Amino acid sequence: GNSVTQMEGPVTLSEEAFLTINCTYTATGYPSLFWYVQYPGEGLQLLLKATKADDKGSNKGFEATYRKETTSFHLEKGSVQVSDSAVYFCALLTAIQGAQKLVFGQGTRLTINP
Amino acid sequence: EPEVTQTPSHQVTQMGQEVILRCVPISNHLYFYWYRQILGQKVEFLVSFYNNEISEKSEIFDDQFSVERPDGSNFTLKIRSTKLEDSAMYFCASSEGTGTKGFFGQGTRLTVV
């Protein structure tokens, strides 16, 4: 079946450090891939997405590249800020009978210290 | 940007009581979803709804759960007889079509005591 595996958290970094959160997936076909972010006390927000192999999604300094050969969609940011502290979820989108269904990873909690 | 709204933001209920969680999807969207997130765990798909019927449901979505689109704007999730383990954040989402961006609401935190 379809599944997403994320890097175990929590991850703690200092401000301006380089961030990588690993995400790999198992899916039939060619799913779209997403990163969602959940800030403390808030709901899920779409951070970025990629819909086909070699696409790069980017937003707010975050990037992720859809790698079909390694079935990965790792999230990266060159210089993190305290405001990036949140839980990050990798997800894949499958389409079942015309409706979409998101399959989420377990989430990675990121804490950035000043 | 258009948004999905959910009410209430937090609901506390006694075990065995019925609860209805409400969602107003984005007006031109055709597909509607409920997900839940037990504290500290992953977000799990519950159900998808299209053309006034359930198109897919997970094994979590048992007979205690039901969904309804009672009018042109609301989409509700009902839990008939709540259990302690139903305590979670429930997210509503909607999308325009297959493979298009899904918009999530802010969630309703349900606490069963």
Image: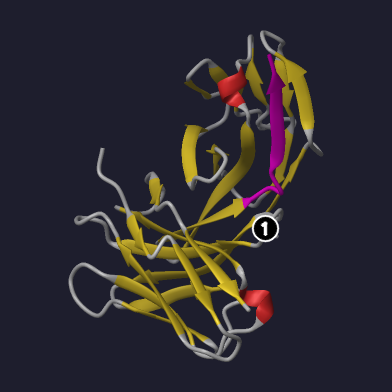
As drawn, is B100 to the left or to the right of A30?
A: left
| Residue B51, percent from left and from top | 28, 73
Identify the residue at image location x=35%, y=57%.
B94
Q: A32 or B66: which is nearer to us?
A: B66
Q: What is the secondary structure assignment of the residue under circle 1?
A: loop
The residue at which mark 1 appears reads as B39
Identify the residue at image location x=47%, y=88%.
B18
| Residue A39, percent from left and from top | 55, 38
| Residue B44 magenta-highlighted | no
Give the magenta part as a residue range.
A104-114
Residue A54 lies, with reference to residue A86, above or below; the image says: above
Residue B79 lies, with reference to residue A78, above or below; the image says: below
Identify the residue at image location x=54%, y=69%.
B110
| Residue A12, quarter of picture | top right
| Residue A105 magenta-highlighted | yes
Q: A24 or A17: which is nearer to us?
A: A17
Quadrant (top left/top right/bottom left/bottom right) for the N terminus of chain B = top left
